[in-house]
Every structure is written in structure tokens, then in C-alpha cells.
């Protein structure tokens, strides 16, 4: 399953955190630093495995924790309908 960022979303960086505006429903989502990191990697087209590796390198964590954190954030993105499956 590949997940991609849904259309009609606008992002802006504010104080190191990303804010996402959903143009379809007017909702605003403020992401913490980890979620912002993951979102930015998705914006440039990295796949899940590549994002896990980036998390390991940047946060100096093991693969199990990186994968668990990524899974949690991706589920939140899906729950908010910010991602679509392709």
C-alpha cells in the first residue's frame, strides 16, 4: 500500500512546526516536530522504508522505534484524511 498526500492541502512552517490547511473543509492541523519531519519526507516522495531510515539517522533511534513512530503518525494522518492510498 502506498500512501500519498491528498490534494487541496496547503502547508506553512511556523516556529519549526508545520501547519496544514485543508482547503476542502477549512480545518487547520498543527504538526509537532516528528510529524512535521515525516510530512516533509512524504512531500518529496520518500517511501515508508526511506522515511524509517531518515528517522533513525536524524533522531538516532533504533529501527523498531522509528517504525512504530512512523506507523502512529501515518495512522493519525489517515484518520485526519490527509493521505490517500494509491
Image: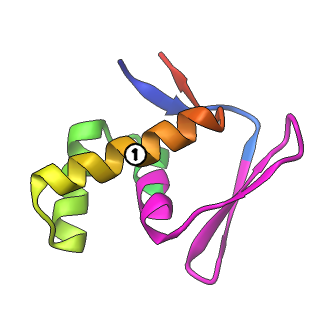
Picture coordinates of residue 29 (x, y %)? 71, 56
Circle 1 packing at 10 Å, graded few (<14), some (14-19), many (20+), is: few
- Is 3 situated above or below 60? above
The residue sitting at 74% across, 51% down in the picture is: 10
Q: Which residue is drawn at 15% across and 72% down?
A: 60
Left or right position of 56 against 28: left
Image quadrant occupied by the N terminus: top left
In percent of width and height, residue 80 lies at 65, 38
Among all residues in the image, which is located at the extreme left?
Answer: 62
Task: Please report the bounds of the magenta region as a residue range.
Answer: 10-39
Give above or below for 48 relative to 35. above
Instruction: Find the residue positioned furthest to the right.
Output: 26
Q: Pointer 1: what residue?
A: 72
**Horizontal and vertical percent for residue 27?**
83, 48
In this picture, is 18 found above or below 23? below
Which residue is found at the position 47% from the left and 71% from the top?
A: 33
Give the image quarter of residue 28.
bottom right
Which secondary structure, mark 1? helix
Farthest-out residue, bottom = 15
In the picture, measured across the screen, residue 23 lies left or right of residue 81, that is right
Q: Does the magenta stretch include residue 16?
A: yes
Task: Answer with the quarter of the image where residue 18 lies.
Answer: bottom right
Residue 68, x across and y down, in percent: 26, 47
> Image height check: is 66 above or below 15?
above
**Residue 31 falls inside the magenta stretch:** yes
Residue lying at 32% horizontally and 53% vertically, measured from the top left = 69
Amino acid at each position: 500500500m502506498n500512501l500519498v498526500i491528498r490534494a487541496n492541502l496547503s502547508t506553512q512552517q511556523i516556529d519549526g512546526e508545520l501547519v496544514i490547511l485543508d482547503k476542502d473543509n477549512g480545518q487547520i492541523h498543527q504538526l509537532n516536530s516528528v510529524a512535521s519531519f515525516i510530512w516533509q519526507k512524504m512531500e518529496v516522495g520518500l517511501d515508508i522504508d526511506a522515511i524509517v531510515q531518515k528517522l533513525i539517522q536524524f533522531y538516532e533511534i533504533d529501527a523498531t522505534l522509528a517504525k512504530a513512530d512512523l506507523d502512529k503518525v501515518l495512522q493519525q494522518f489517515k484518520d485526519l484524511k490527509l493521505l490517500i492510498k494509491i
